């Protein structure tokens, strides 16, 4: 026992050391999980509600500070369409339609430069100032041509004003002729209507007398027919004498002849038996013309446009019954001749350029249009037929020809200056002021960055010399190449307009989206590849010509399935799993996967729709799960 007495102090020291180590370990553990142990029970509750049962070693609970240190991000498991894609290599290149070469288009000496390499002018900005004597001479030629043209315009205006007065006078004459003939037609129309009314009255009276006779004869005929039948019966029974029967037979025959004669008067006028029956059945309240007009309309008789639609057929048919029919015909003939005269004057007015609207207003108001508000040029252009009869027209035509030649000369000089780089506004200003200038301002034809500069102040340049190169990278091309063996698989699935997603190493988290704008018809013999080009919008200028790019071509959309981002899936020892977030707790779920594209992968088992999976920070969670005592340094942002 004595020989072991020295061990007791050593044991005491060992106990103290062990206690210190345990305390230190607890401190480190608390640093990682401080204020989070209260969430453990909630996390397990969430897990059970989600239908999963996981052991303690597959669960990690983090503080908000730990999440920030890790840079942890989540995304939702959702129903998405997994696309059929193919990935190829490519290169960013300048868009061929967004590159500009700046030339002066006129020779001269550079006096001042406003932009240099690396700067980004906007379209229309002045790049440099150029002194050009050739340009100054062309401006002098422009001023002379403009002055000559202006003089001819003034002379032509004075000459054409004379013709304008003649045109106005002739137009007024055409209106007066038309208005007078129209007035005559209206007067004759009134005469025709009066005579027509008289004839209709006479015809109506005669027809009513004929109807009265017909109805009276029919009534007497029916009455005698009835009496005769009764007397015949009495005679057969020897109640009445034979003499009375003979007398009544004579009266009946006379009444029958009267009825036949009354009908014959109507039949001579072409009235049918059916119409006569209508007249006899009528109670006398219907006007005779209405009864007769029904028959005319049933036969589809055409009426004259100069006569009333209802009475015209009756007047034509029953003219013999009217004493005024002859005078009516004379009035109608005069009316038709007046109508022909109106039509002729109307055609002459229309041929002179007067419009239908104007003639209608003239007929309605009787007001002659003077055309004083119409300009001389408009009169000659619209009513050239009157000018053709003028003796001085040849002089006007010759002056117009001279003016046309002057305009051609002026246009040629203007075009020459436009080719030299002057705008239409610049040219108009020179004509207005009459002051030529030797200074020419070379402007940027497009917005973009100056990539090349070939001049300095004092340089003498020719019109075809290259001064600057400008590149606009707001839109770029990404050229890709598809190998011949891959081409066989996607031949019928990719085309112009197919979607393309672009990744570059400089911005790994950024996806640039565009569409295929061209596919080469040639296979490159060395690499056995087919080139294609995708147009990509590049407002932030992240894509720079010359960059290497990974391209994903979207061939077709798949069916909707449950999926998660590819970054959420971890492979370990042949198995795949994800971390599912339940509040501050993250649980490891083994999963069964299906198809995938460049962004998402199908989940067939292990995750439910709507659950949040970790897409950034998964490897840090793996390390923490393997060594729970490790902590995340709030300042360094990585594990220790």
Image (tube, rainbow, N blue to C red):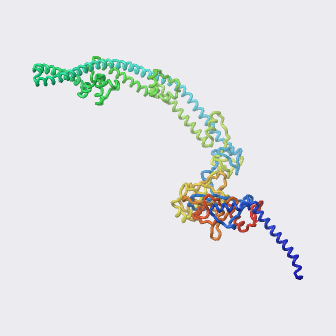
The answer to whether residue 614 shows anywhere in this view is: no
Residue sitting at x 65%, y 45%: 123
Figure check: 471 above or below 34: above
Q: Foreground residue, 625 or 306?
A: 625
Please identify the quarter of the rendering in which residue 432 is found: top right
Asked if residue 357 can be seen in this view, the reply is yes
Q: Quadrant of residue 298?
A: top left
Task: Determine the image quadrant of residue 295.
Answer: top left
The image position of residue 305, as x and y in percent, is 35, 26
Quadrant assignment for the C terminus: bottom right
Q: Nearer the viewer, residue 616 or 259?
A: 259
Front residue (pair 308, 34): 34
The spot of residue 526 in percent (x, y) is 57, 65
Tell me if 345 is positioned left or right of 542 in this view.
left
Q: Is residue 311 above or below residue 121?
A: above
**What residue lies at 40% left-to-right and 21% top-to-bottom?**
182
In this view, the residue in front, 92 or 587, is 587
At which x and y percent is residue 247?
13, 19
Q: With 107 as the anchor, is 351 left or right in this view?
A: left
Number of on-image labels: 0
> In the rendering, at what x and y percent does residue 120 appear?
68, 49
């Amino acid at each position: 026992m004595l020989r072991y007495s020295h061990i007791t102090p050593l044991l005491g020291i060992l106990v103290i050391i062990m206690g210190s180590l345990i305390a230190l370990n607890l401190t480190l553990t608390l640093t990682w999980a401080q204020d989070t142990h209260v969430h453990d029970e909630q996390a397990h509750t969430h897990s059970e509600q989600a239908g999963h049962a996981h052991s303690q070693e597959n669960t990690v609970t983090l503080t908000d500070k730990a999440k920030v240190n890790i840079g942890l991000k989540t995304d939702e498991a959702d129903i998405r369409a997994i696309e059929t894609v193919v990935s190829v290599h490519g290169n960013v290149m300048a868009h061929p339609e967004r590159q500009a070469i700046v030339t002066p288009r006129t020779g001269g000496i550079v006096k001042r430069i406003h932009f240099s390499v690396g700067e980004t002018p906007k379209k229309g900005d002045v790049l440099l100032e150029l002194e050009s004597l050739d340009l100054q001479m062309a401006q002098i030629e422009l001023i002379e041509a403009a002055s000559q043209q202006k003089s001819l315009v003034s002379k032509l205006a004075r000459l054409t004003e004379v013709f304008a007065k003649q045109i106005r006078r002739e137009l007024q004459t055409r209106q007066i002729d038309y208005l007078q003939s129209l007035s005559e037609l209206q007067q004759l129309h009134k005469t025709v209507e009066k005579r027509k009314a008289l004839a209709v009255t006479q015809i109506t009276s005669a027809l009513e007398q004929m109807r009265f006779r017909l109805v009276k004869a029919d009534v007497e005929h029916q009455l005698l027919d009835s009496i005769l039948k009764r007397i015949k019966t009495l005679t057969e029974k020897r109640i009445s004498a034979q003499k009375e029967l003979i007398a009544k037979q004579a009266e009946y025959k006379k009444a029958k002849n009267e009825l036949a004669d009354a009908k014959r008067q109507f039949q001579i006028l072409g009235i049918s038996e059916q119409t006569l029956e209508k007249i006899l059945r009528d109670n006398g309240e219907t006007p005779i013309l209405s009864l007769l007009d029904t028959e005319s309309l049933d036969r589809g008789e055409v009426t004259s446009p100069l006569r009333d639609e209802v009475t015209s057929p009756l007047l034509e048919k029953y003219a013999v019954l009217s004493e005024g029919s002859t005078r009516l015909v004379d009035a109608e003939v005069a009316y038709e001749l007046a109508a022909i005269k109106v039509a002729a004057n109307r055609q002459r007015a229309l041929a002179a350029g007067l419009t239908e609207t104007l003639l209608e207003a003239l007929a309605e108001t009787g007001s002659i249009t003077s055309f004083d508000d119409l300009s001389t040029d408009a009169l000659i252009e619209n009513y050239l037929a009157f000018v053709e009869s003028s003796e001085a027209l040849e002089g006007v035509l010759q002056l117009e020809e001279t003016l046309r030649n002057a305009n051609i000369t002026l246009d040629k000089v203007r075009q020459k200056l436009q080719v030299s780089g002057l705008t239409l506004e610049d040219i108009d200003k020179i004509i207005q002021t009459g002051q030529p200038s030797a200074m020419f301002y070379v402007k940027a034809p497009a917005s973009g960055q100056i990539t090349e500069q070939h001049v300095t102040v004092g340089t003498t340049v020719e019109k075809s010399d290259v001064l600057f190169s400008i590149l606009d990278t707001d839109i770029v091309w990404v050229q890709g190449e598809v190998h011949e063996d891959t081409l066989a698989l996607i031949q019928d699935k990719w085309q112009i307009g197919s979607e393309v997603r672009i990744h570059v190493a400089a911005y790994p988290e950024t996806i640039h989206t565009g569409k295929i704008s061209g596919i080469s018809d040639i296979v490159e013999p060395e690499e056995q590849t087919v080139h294609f080009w995708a147009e990509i919008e590049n407002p932030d200028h992240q894509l720079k010509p010359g960059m290497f790019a990974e391209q994903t071509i979207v061939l077709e959309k798949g069916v909707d399935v449950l999926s998660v981002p590819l970054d959420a899936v971890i492979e370990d020892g042949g198995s795949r799993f994800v971390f599912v977030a339940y509040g501050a707790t993250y649980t490891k779920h083994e999963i069964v996967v299906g198809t995938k594209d460049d962004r998402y992968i199908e989940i067939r088992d292990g995750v439910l729709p709507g659950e949040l999976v970790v897409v950034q920070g998964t490897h840090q969670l793996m390390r923490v799960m393997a060594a729970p005592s490790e902590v995340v340094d709030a300042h360094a942002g990585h594990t220790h």
